[in-house]
């Protein structure tokens, strides 16, 4: 005859096996489809010539972070105003 603690251990082990397979099945499919959707959105976005030129200028100056963002914003505004 099995003791209560061995029955509880057997039930816990069986539930872990069942639960882990249920989680594995439910998370595999959506996780694989999400990155593909994100890359498609990024691929569709085209950069303007002004944006590319200002990025090159920021690279030449070695700007990063907030300084780069401020520089590019001002540069793009100036370039569009000149047109």
Image (tube, grey):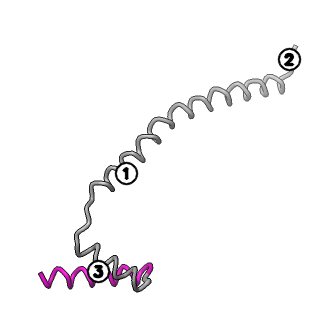
Which quadrant is the N terminus positioned in?
A: top right
Determine whether 58 is above or below 1 in the image: below
In reply to whether residue 52 is colored magenta, the answer given is no
Give the number of the mark in front: 1 or 2: 1
Residue 77's image quarter?
bottom left
Instruction: Give the residue drawn at x 27%, y 74%.
Output: 51
Q: Name the mark on residue 29.
A: none
Mark 1–mark 2 Cα distance, whole angstroms, equals 56 Å
Pinpoint residue 32: horizontal percent, then vertical percent: 46, 40
**Magenta run includes residue 67:** yes
Segment tinted magenta in the rendering? 64-83
Q: Residue at x 27, y 84 (%)?
A: 74
Q: Nearer the viewer, residue 39 or 2?
A: 39
Q: Which residue is at the front of the view, 17 or 68? A: 68
Residue drawn at 56 percent across, 29 percent down: 22
For label 3, count other residues whose C-alpha is less than 10 Å away and answer few (under 14), some (14-19) or many (20+). few
Numbered marks: total: 3
Which comes before the other along the chain, label 3 or label 1? Answer: 1
21 vs 37, left or right, is right
Q: Which residue in the protein does label 2 denote?
A: 2
Q: Is residue 56 above or below residue 31?
A: below
Neighbor class of circle 1 (other Cα within 10 Å; few <14, some 14-19, many 20+) is few
Residue denoted by label 1: 39
Q: Quadrant of the C terminus?
A: bottom left
Q: Decide: few, some or many residues near mark 2? Use Cα within 10 Å; few <14, some 14-19, many ≥20.
A: few
Local secondary structure at mark 1: helix
Which numbered disc flags the more N-terminal residue, 3 or 2? 2
């Amino acid at each position: 005859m099995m003791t209560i603690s061995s029955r509880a251990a057997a039930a816990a082990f069986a539930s872990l096996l069942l639960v882990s397979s249920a989680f594995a099945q439910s998370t595999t499919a959506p996780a694989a489809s999400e990155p593909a959707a994100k890359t498609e959105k990024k691929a569709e976005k085209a950069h303007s010539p002004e944006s590319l030129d200002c990025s090159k200028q920021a690279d030449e100056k070695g700007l990063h972070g907030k300084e780069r963002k401020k520089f590019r914003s001002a540069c793009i505004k100036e370039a569009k105003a000149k047109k």
